[in-house]
Amino acid sequence: MKKLVVFAALCTAMVACGSGDTNKGTEDKPADNASTAPAASGNEKALEMIGALDCTTCHKINEKNIGPAYTEVAKKYEATDENITMLADKIIKGGSGNWGTVPMTPHPTLSADSAKEMVRYILSLKNQ
């Protein structure tokens, strides 16, 4: 769980540091029942936010680095509204203890909507 907190905080910092617009990509967010084409667009926006923050310093998609791989996080957590909110909160507030002793940097300037979009993308990697 600590690693997840570290991951979430690092992701948030990358978004916060990468752009003055912390709501980037959230205005055009598709509805939950939208087709796969808009979902792919949402994934691209989430990847842009992750790339703009410091997330990739500690996390990789398929392999453990300083923090857990995104696919490990996806396997640990179901993509429920409750988990998405909890993980987005961890990105924003940071913390440690869930995935080891290395703390995840908080990202307090990241909006909850942006953090949730990033979490949705990460959790979509469950079967990779």
Image: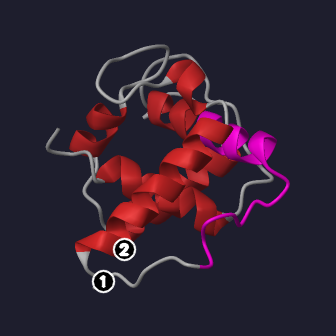
Location of residue 86 in the rendering, given as x and y in whole percent from the top left corner: 49, 58
Q: Which residue is mark 1?
A: 34
Magenta stretch: give its range. Answer: 9-27
- The residue drawn where x is 52% and y is 62% is 116
- Decide which of 10, 35 is in the foreground and name it: 35
Q: Residue 79 versus residue 32: which sits nearer the camera?
A: 32
Q: Nearer the viewer, residue 77 or 49?
A: 49
Image quadrant where residue 40 sits: bottom left
Q: Could you tell me the amino acid type at mark 2?
A: Pro
> Which quadrant of the figure contains the N terminus?
top left
Q: Are marks 1 and 2 in contact (CB under 8 Å)?
A: yes
Residue type, numbered disc 1: Ala
* Element class at badge 2: helix
In the rendered image, which quarter is residue 120 located in? Answer: bottom left
What residue is rendered at 29% in x and 25% in y?
62
**Label 2: which residue?**
38
- Name the mark on residue 74: none
> In the image as oriented, which residue stretches furthest toward the right?
20
